[in-house]
Amino acid sequence: MSDTHNEREQLLALRDRIDEIDATIGKLISERAGCAQKVAEVKSASTEGDVLFYRPEREAQVLRKAMERNEGPLSDEEMARLFREIMSACLALERPIKVAYLGPEGTFTQQAAQKHFGASAVAMPFSAIDEVFREVEAGAVNYGVVPVENSTEGVVSHTLDNFMNSNLKICGEVELRVHHNLMVSSVTDVKSISRIYSHGQSLAQCRKWLDAHYPKAERIAVSSNAEAARRLKGEWNAAAIAPEKAAELYDLQVVSEKIEDQPDNSTRFLIIGTQAVPASGVDKTSLLIAMRNQPGALHNLLAPFHAHDIDLTRVETRPSRSGVWTYVFFVDFTGHVDDPVIRATLDEVSARVSDLKILGSYPKAVL
Ligand SMILES: C=C(O[C@@H]1C=C(C(=O)O)C=C[C@H]1O)C(=O)O
């Protein structure tokens, strides 16, 4: 009896303390929002024309600091995620940022957009990567989010090809752990699942799991995971493999979570926009390089990076659409174009190739 009384007393005291802390947090968030508003006023006063309220490099720094300061018990990622939402709300006070993403709703790209810009951004789905590029180019939205190193939707080359004919810049990157879930509709009889819908890449990523659990079910590849989820409505003998978000959106029940064969399955997305982003301290740069087909071409192109000890994170080759004997390379490396060493390296590379386009320097993904 006294124990319960004691427990009640303890809980009361703790809840009182939580209420006090919440009041303080609330005040501080309001004060922070007021500061962000003032920043916007200062920016507007000193700039003619379109003002850039959103600063990717500053946001990356704020998130990194939140992680460095963190002493637990929350994980660094959780702490940064909370700050991500505070910044998103502060920025939206000025004008909610408009973001186009590769849809439909419920795709991993939508998750990436939300992870990068927070919930206060207005995110709009478009059905093709070209459309996302076009919306940003036309100024209808501030930024676009497209998959690039894609273990899921299989559209890497499409994104890269779009950069060949676009002046858009890469302003950021997002990394997303990709989890697959098996879901069914309310009328599905789980014991008689004979068809499983998903994007071809997702089916491939869950192949072993499907072999073990649904060896007899027919696997049907559709245009996206969200589309797979959407189809389920009213089908009593079918299931879909899709992100958790799709279950919420299409009113489905997840019957098995995290069914991907590789537990560290992840996908990288790019933020495309029109602004050149200053250095954040931990940055990456992406290049598009065209060069003639000759012996040792790739070695020749990469030698200056090696000589200056620059860390290449990706080299991708695509056929050029213009000259028949021309290669196009997409190169990512660690560093920012404002760094003199990087500048010097790029000058050397430039002298060895037919064309070099800097697609952007941007903060390395924080979360
Ligand atoms: C407040 C600023 O503007 C925006 C809001 C930020 C914030 O809330 O911390 C950070 C960067 C910008 O996207 C700023 O430039 O410092």
Image (cartoon, grey):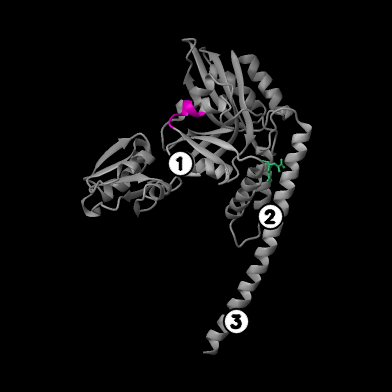
Residue depth check, mark 1 versus mark 3: number of the one nearer the observer: 3
Q: Does the residue labelled 3 lie within 8 Å of ligand 1?
A: no
Secondary structure under the numbered disc 2 in the rendered image: helix
Residue 128 falls inside the magenta stretch: yes
Instruction: Say what amino acid the circle numbered 1 marks.
Output: Phe
**Up-down relation of residue 332 to residue 281 (above or below):** above
Secondary structure under the numbered disc 3 in the rendered image: helix
Q: Looking at the image, do the residues carrying marks 1 and 3 touch, with CB atoms under 8 Å apart?
A: no
Residue depth check, mark 2 versus mark 1: number of the one nearer the observer: 2
**Residue placed under numbered mark 1 in the picture:** 108
For residue 219, what is the image quadrant?
top left
Q: Return the disc, 2 or 1, that comes first in the chain's sequence.
A: 2
Q: Return the disc, 2 or 3, that comes first in the chain's sequence.
A: 3
Q: Distance between the residues labelled 2 and 1?
A: 30 Å
**Up-down relation of residue 357 to residue 143 (above or below):** above
Residue depth check, mark 2 versus mark 3: number of the one nearer the observer: 2
**Up-down relation of residue 311 to residue 63 (above or below):** above
Residue furthest out toward the bottom: 1
Instruction: Say what amino acid the circle numbered 3 marks.
Output: Glu
**Residue placed under numbered mark 3 in the picture:** 9
Residue 224, x across and y down, in percent: 38, 37
Q: Residues within 10 Å of mark 1 (few under 14, many from 20)?
A: many
For residue 297, what is the image quadrant?
top right
**Residue placed under numbered mark 2 in the picture:** 29
Q: How far apart are marks 1 and 3 (CA)?
A: 46 Å
Please identify the dominant SS of the magenta region.
Answer: helix
Magenta span: 127-132
Of residue 339 and residue 81, the one placed in the foreground of this image is 81
